[in-house]
Image (spheres, rainbow, N blue to C red):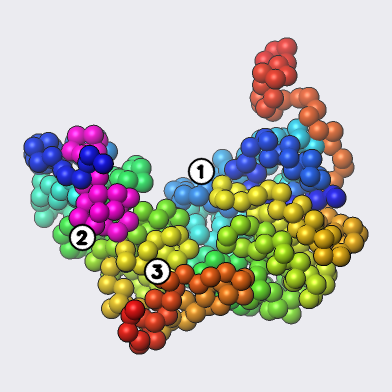
């Protein structure tokens, strides 16, 4: 099983997770920019975070044989804080970088006017930079938030196949399907989808335009949820080729629209250091460490 | 649990120090648990979700002392100082600041501060802060949209609705619609609908609360 996890917050995970993900077949991923679990208070906090996504985290993943890409954005939650919204002005610098394969996560949290303004602005940045968009749909009032999301996407003029609408469930799948956007499902304990429910949706509507992610972060989550979904598909009679389509070819097709995907195999646990830090530290001490 | 009551002597001493030197609150406020005591307040909840803890009440006394020391002529200075207590506070201190908001004298500076801190607290996912933001009369500063999202957030954050001040008076049909959407999602996922979601539905459908 080869796996491309199109949404996972590796900054919150350990090297053990990287190792287990590689062993389960994960060879590439996208880490979208989101919040830290508690609110940021200024644009500098975002800049350091973005620098980490295109720097240290990419290097860390490569040490475990995984190609790390990221999406950059001001997330919906923090778009409500005027101290943070300033970061919109520096986004274009980051959206121009290699390895940045989408604008995201954008979308709605509490469906405020400030969120809508930041969302619309970032849709126009995506159009300008030729990047796909990764849209977060809200936890609260999800159906209404998803409906408004699709209206804004349609108004932006961005072709729907360049927009991935994420965190879908049984109540939002059909409207996103009708829009022509790519459908994202987060397999995440307690609050989002589960492998068996995912299989039922795939059985009902087919595999076209569907991507599955773990959305693993600092919450109760599982970076192997993608693999668990592949296993559930096989148990339900889907073929290995079907699994490959959902877990690899579909997300690759979507993010390849950025023109910035790098998918050559990496040798895991290779040498080298990032800013003098090798991650491996004492286990494989380098001569000058 | 050995806590549960504030030691009057130490608290009186802290209040006196803040009255004499308002700037001292920055270091006295964080140390309240060590100097005055810890434990559940009248609600009996040690996490301070259902009501203020001993530390919350002592910290509110310090904020009152600060307001008195600065007097009516310095509302901006008071707001600045309270905002700093929140900005540099850990979650317990932030919760205490939120629970202290009703003691601030009315005025533009206090209104702006209240609106900003409630928004910050409801942006995060810390149940202690969500409960404190919705748990006092200061929540009147939230507009209806923000207040409804706050209440709905309780269902996602294990904050019992008993923590929400004036729930029965403010719950409206739009909140009912949102709660119904939440219940429909839970059912579509094969999950149970929590009692608090049912309570919201009954509150907003004009039925008697169970």
User: A34 left or right of B83?
Assistant: right
> Main SS of the magenta segment?
loop
User: A172 left or right of A231?
Assistant: left
Q: Which residue is mark 2?
A: B102
Q: Nearer the viewer, mark 1 or mark 3?
A: 3
The answer to whether residue B70 is visible is: no
Q: Same chain, marks 1 and 2?
A: no
Q: Nearer the viewer, mark 1 or mark 2?
A: 2
Q: For the residue carrying disc 1, how many other residues have a C-alpha within 10 Å: few (<14), some (14-19), or many (20+)?
A: few
Secondary structure of the residue carrying tag 2 is helix
Counting from the top left corner in percent of width and height, residue B175 is at: 42, 78
State how far apart marks 1 and 2 are (Cα). 33 Å
Counting from the top left corner in percent of width and height, residue A199 is at: 76, 66
Q: Which residues are magenta?
A: B31-55
Secondary structure of the residue carrying tag 1 is helix
- Residue placed at 25% from the left, 49% from the top? B40
Q: Which residue is mark 3?
A: B151
Could you say which disc has been placed on residue A44 in the image?
1
Residue A144 among magenta residues:
no
State how far apart marks 2 and 3 are (Cα). 19 Å
- Residue placed at 69% from the left, 74% from the top? A173
Which image quadrant for residue A116? bottom right
In depth, the one of A177 and B128 nearer the eye is B128
**Mark found first going from the N terminus, 2 or 3:** 2
In the rendered image of this protein, does residue A56 appear above or below residue A68? above
- Pinpoint the chain carrying mark 3: B
Secondary structure of the residue carrying tag 3 is helix
């Amino acid at each position: 099983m080869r796996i491309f996890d199109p949404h996972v917050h590796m900054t919150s995970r350990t090297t053990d997770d990287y190792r287990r993900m590689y062993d389960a077949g994960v060879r590439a991923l996208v880490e979208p920019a989101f919040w830290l679990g508690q609110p940021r208070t200024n644009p500098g906090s975002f800049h350091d975070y973005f620098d980490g996504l295109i720097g240290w985290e990419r290097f860390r993943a490569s040490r475990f044989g995984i190609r790390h890409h990221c999406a950059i954005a001001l997330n919906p939650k923090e778009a409500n804080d005027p101290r943070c919204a300033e970061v919109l002005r520096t986004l274009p610098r980051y959206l121009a970088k290699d390895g940045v394969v989408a604008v995201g996560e954008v979308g709605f949290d509490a469906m405020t006017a400030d969120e809508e303004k930041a969302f619309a602005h970032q849709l126009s940045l995506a159009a300008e930079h030729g990047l796909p968009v990764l849209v977060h749909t809200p936890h609260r009032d999800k159906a209404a938030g998803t409906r408004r999301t699709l209206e804004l996407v349609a108004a932006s003029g961005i072709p729907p196949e360049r927009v991935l609408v994420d965190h879908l469930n049984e109540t939002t799948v059909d409207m996103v399907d009708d829009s022509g956007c790519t459908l994202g499902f987060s397999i995440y304990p307690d609050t989002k989808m589960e492998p068996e429910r995912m299989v039922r949706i795939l059985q009902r509507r087919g595999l076209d335009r569907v991507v599955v992610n773990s959305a693993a972060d600092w919450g109760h989550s599982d970076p192997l949820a993608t693999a668990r979904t592949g296993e559930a598909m096989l148990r339900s009679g889907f073929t290995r080729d079907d699994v490959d389509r959902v877990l690899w070819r579909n997300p690759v097709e979507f993010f390849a629209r950025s023109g910035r995907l790098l998918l050559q195999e990496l040798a895991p646990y290779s040498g080298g250091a990032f800013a003098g830090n090798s991650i491996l530290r004492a286990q494989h001490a380098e001569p000058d460490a | 649990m050995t806590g549960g009551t504030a030691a009057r002597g130490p608290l009186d001493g802290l209040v006196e120090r803040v009255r004499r030197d308002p700037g001292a609150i920055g270091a006295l406020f964080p140390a309240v648990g060590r100097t005055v005591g810890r434990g559940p307040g009248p609600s009996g909840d040690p996490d301070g979700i259902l009501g203020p803890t001993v530390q919350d009440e002592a910290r509110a006394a310090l904020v009152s002392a600060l307001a008195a020391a600065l007097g009516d002529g310095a509302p901006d200075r008071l707001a600045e100082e309270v905002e700093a207590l929140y900005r540099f506070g850990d979650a317990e201190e932030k919760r205490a600041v939120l629970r202290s908001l009703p003691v601030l004298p009315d005025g533009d500076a206090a209104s702006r501060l209240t609106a900003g801190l409630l928004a910050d607290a409801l942006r995060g996912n810390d149940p202690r802060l969500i409960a404190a933001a919705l748990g006092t009369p200061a929540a009147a500063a939230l507009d209806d949209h923000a207040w409804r999202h706050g209440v709905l957030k309780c269902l996602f954050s294990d904050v019992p609705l008993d923590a929400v001040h004036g729930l029965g008076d403010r719950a409206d049909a739009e909140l009912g619609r949102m709660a119904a959407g939440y219940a429909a999602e839970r059912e579509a996922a094969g999950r149970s609908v929590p009692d608090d979601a049912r309570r919201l539905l009954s509150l907003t459908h004009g039925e008697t609360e169970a």
